[in-house]
Structures are given as structure tokens and as C-alpha cells.
Image (cartoon, grey):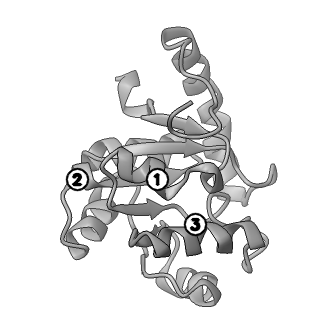
Amino acid sequence: MLEIFKPTWMVKSIYQVSPTELKQAGIKAVLSDLDNTLIAWNNPDGTPQLRAWMEALAAEGIPLVVVSNNNRRRVAKAVAPLQLPFVARALKPLGIGIKRAYRDLGLQPDEVVMVGDQYLTDVAASHAAGVRCILVQPLVTSDQWNTKINRFLERFVKQALQKKYPEQTWQEGLND
């Protein structure tokens, strides 16, 4: 049961993952959670670092699609400045939204990666959809009220994962 919460990779920040590393891993598209993964939940404009990473992905022909549990209006407003496609109401930890995203791209599960900052939603959903997952550290330490509940429960999951998989630690990129 614990394996559904085990990420494929643990990287401090998604901005550290280069398009070259993604291509070497056979990744043709990146699916990403929104809040505290791509943008801080309380900073919808993103950062120059995010924009540089998005430009690097685009230059290599790797699409970036937001897969979020938020409603359509909230996600559309958040990604408008970034001009990103998205799947709202993804129903994570179910794999429904992730599957919809990679099917819309015409890709197979082994050709995409899901990026997120939560074990209970993002990592579990990636397993449910049969895709690899990059767990990242949250961009900010504060969370919306509903995420605070998940963070509390995640403490127990993290402890169990660290005990069972002590070799899995935070990396600077996929190849560290």
C-alpha cells in the first residue's frame, strides 16, 4: 500500500529539471500541479525562474499542462498569465485528470511525467494513472486551509517512506 505514495524522483524544485534530463528519461510532456508546484498558491504571477523553465521546455518541444483539483475558473485565472493548457477538477488522487491530459496530447503513460508537491494527491494520482512522478518541495511553507489537512497526514506517509526507502532523498535533478 505504501508504494502508491512513493515518487519516481524527488527533486527540490521543478525548475532544476532540464528538458535534456526529461528527454533522456523518455518524457515528451510534463503534467504539473498548480499551487505550490508551479506557482506559490498566494502568488499567481509566477517567477522569472518559472518563465525561463517554461521557455526551455517549449524550445525543446515539451508541452507543459497544468493538472489541478481546483475549479475551472480558479485554474483558468491562475494560468492565464502563463498561457498554459490545463485540466481542472482533476479528482486527484484518482488518475482521471492525468489520463485526460496525456490522452488529449496523444501520448502514452510512459511518455509523460506528473509533477507535484503532495504525496496524497499528486503522487498517488500518478500511480493511479500509471505515469512516473516527480515530487517537489512546496514553493512556500504556507498552504491553503484544505491543503493543511493533507500536510498533516503526509507526515506519517513521509516517515513510513523514509523508513522503507532510506535511499530516496531530495535531488538537484533527475540524474543526481
Viewer-side label of 2, 3? 2
| Residue 97 x/y as whole percent | 33, 65
Q: Earlier in the sequence, mark 2 or mark 1?
A: 1
Give the CA distance from mark 2 to mark 1: 19 Å
> Which residue matches tag 3?
34
In depth, the one of 133 and 174 nearer the eye is 174
Above-or-below relation of 159 to 27: above
Which disc number belongs to residue 20? Answer: 1
Viewer-side label of 2, 1? 1
Are there few (<14), some (14-19), or many (20+) residues within 10 Å of tag 2?
A: some
Q: Name the element at disc 1.
A: helix
Residue 85, by quadrant, is bottom left
Q: Name the element at disc 3.
A: loop
Are there few (<14), some (14-19), or many (20+) residues within 10 Å of tag 1?
A: few
Q: Residue at x 42, y 62 (%)?
A: 31
Give the CA distance from mark 3 to mark 1: 23 Å
Whether label 2 touches label 3, CB < 8 Å: no
> Which residue matches tag 2?
109
Mark 3: amino acid: Leu
Residue 29, by quadrant, is bottom left
Q: Which of marks 3 and 1 is nearer the N terminus?
A: 1
Q: Residue at x 54, y 14 (%)?
A: 167
Whether label 3 touches label 1, CB < 8 Å: no
In depth, the one of 29 and 149 nearer the eye is 29
Which quadrant, please, contains the N terminus? Answer: top left
Q: Which residue is drawn at 59% across and 25% down?
A: 158
